[in-house]
Image: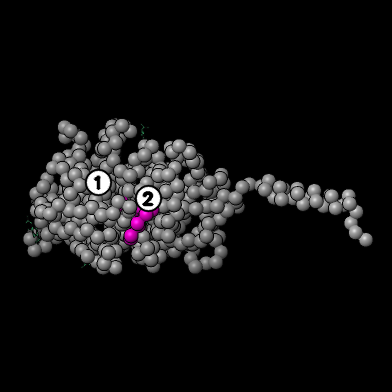
Amino acid sequence: MGMGRGARLLGFCLWLWLPRLRVQGPRPAQPEQVHLSYPGDPSSMVVTWTTFDPAESLVLFGQAPGKALPHKASGNATRFVDGGSLGRAMFIHRVTLRGLLPGQSYVYRCGSPWGWSQRYGFRALQNGSSWSPRFALFGDMGLENPQSLSRLQRETQQGWYDAVLHIGDFAYDLDSDNALVGDAFMRKIEAVAAFVPYMTCPGNHEEKYNFSNYRSRFSMPGDTESLWYSWDVGPAHLITFSTEVYFFLDYGEQLVAKQFQWLERDLQEANQPARRGERPWIITMGHRPMYCSNNDKDDCTQYESIVRKGLKPNRYGLEDLFFKYGVDLMLWAHEHSYERLWPVYNYKVYNGSTAAPYTNPSTPVHIITGSAGCKEQLDPFIPDPREWSAVRIEDYGYARMQIVNMTHLWLEQVSDDQNGKVVDKIWLIKDRHGPRAWH
Ligand SMILES: *[C@@H]1O[C@H](CO)[C@@H](O)[C@H](O)[C@H]1NC(C)=O
Ligand SMILES: *[C@@H]1O[C@H](CO)[C@@H](O)[C@H](O)[C@H]1NC(C)=O
Ligand SMILES: *[C@@H]1O[C@H](CO)[C@@H](O)[C@H](O)[C@H]1NC(C)=O
Ligand SMILES: *[C@@H]1O[C@H](CO)[C@@H](O)[C@H](O)[C@H]1NC(C)=O
Ligand SMILES: *[C@@H]1O[C@H](CO)[C@@H](O)[C@H](O)[C@H]1NC(C)=O
């Protein structure tokens, strides 16, 4: 005996209706573009990610290699609308993990009941100043042609680094193609940035819509939307700033003064005897260098570079400021090459000695490493550099830095063109730090 026609019709209607019931719940919101940043406290870490639908902001975490993730932290999402013609919207989620044990390894996943990420892991930074933090640093890495990324991924996941410093110019560009390039780039660097704090500063490629893709997607410490900030790590105080405030004055010339005043106050505080005694190294990171010997007519090729000397006439120049407060080392990018300078101030070389130029130099040291790879390829050099230029390498690559202790800092440059070979290295040795080291 078959089913009655009425029952069959009812079954058919149920069949039509049930799938619609299933999509009545919240839309799935799969986390992507997961990255970490260090908020300046070794018991904390910030997790940032993107969803395209609204969702809660949760992170489940626990100590590695535990199977369970017993801790839960919650945070907030902000809705970000790109300035492009499509006005694409996305939700940027931020959660601060607290109560971490310094130096310990953790696993985590982020998301919400509407979608969880896979598991990632990181090591909380160590506490205090007597340890030797290790960094990878580079600038100018794009979605296309990111030559250094696979090597950085492998080394990061092998635990080589405590933090990564990306010294401006991302994706080429974060806003391109209605910010789809930014999304794809942020997905791509997840292989590094979900495992180690990925610390950033803005470069000229972030300029569109008043740096809004940069300001919205990253989560650096402080309250300036990742534009300028500082943090302590081991025996060092790291200061990050925007060189771009000097060049895009339409977004607010007052930002030049505001940042400069912040820089001076931060440098004064870092130079208080108790603080400088504990963290003697002061290291700056900014995108456009003061000096370079590339042949592209950039600011650093000008005798009176704006970053170096400030806005005309002589306002907010950074070389004098950094000299005055005894900055030890300045890290730069922007030029798609590697260049190391002899210790230099106002175009004059002040070697520690001819035999050991970087042992107790009388001025700051500059390193430019901006060739992690992008679609604009490499920047060539002029044939005859000035006497302050020590080493120039036109290869794709990135630098490694270890702040070994209060007196010794190691820097080396890796070449991707030469299969990961270390192509330059120095010990920067300082028995004295601060302005009193300049003699
Ligand atoms: C870090 O060290 C300081 C000084 O010893 C101590 O007060 C602080 O509680 C430590 N922080 C953590 C997270 O262990
Ligand atoms: C969410 O953001 C608001 C405003 O910024 C803040 O007051 C609140 O504490 C945040 N909530 C969480 C869970 O972080
Ligand atoms: C650009 O962004 C900065 C930082 O958020 C802000 O202070 C400034 O007012 C903005 N400028 C314009 C023209 O919107
Ligand atoms: C600085 O030291 C280097 C390396 O010894 C040397 O080649 C260079 O000429 C020195 N520069 C000056 C101005 O003494
Ligand atoms: C600092 O590190 C250097 C290089 O490893 C080492 O020679 C020196 O003895 C260390 N100094 C102290 C005080 O440990």
Percent coordinates x, y for residue 88 in the rendering: 49, 41
Can see residue 437?
Answer: no
Looking at the image, which is closer to me, 378 or 97?
A: 378
| Residue type, label 2 | Ala
Name the spot of residue 351 as percent of width and height, x first. Answer: 10, 56
Of callouts 1 and 2, the N-terminal one:
2
Q: Residue at x 26, y 37 (%)?
A: 247
Give, as a three-letter code, the residue at label 1.
Arg
State the residue at coordinates (32%, 53%). 374
* Residue assigned mark 1: 288
Q: Quadrant of ligand 5?
A: bottom left
Q: Is residue 236 magenta?
A: no
Residue 76 % position (x, y): 51, 44
Tell me: 113 left or right of 331. Answer: right
- Residue drawn 29% across the image and 67% down it: 420
Q: CA distance from mark 1 to mark 2?
A: 17 Å
Residue under the image location 18 percent in, 33 percent down: 312
Taking 69 as reference, is 140 above or below it? above
**Rendering colour mode:** one colour
**Element on which disc 1 rests:** loop
| SS under mark 2 | strand
Whole-percent x, y for residue 136 in the image:
31, 59
Instruction: In the rendered structure, find residue 171 and report the number of the disc placed on it.
Output: 2
Count residues near mark 2 (Cα–Cα under 10 Å), then give few for <14, some for 14-19, many for 20+: many
**What range of the chain is rendered magenta?**
140-148
Front residue of this view, candidates 379 and 283: 379
In the figure, residue 352 lies in which quadrant? bottom left
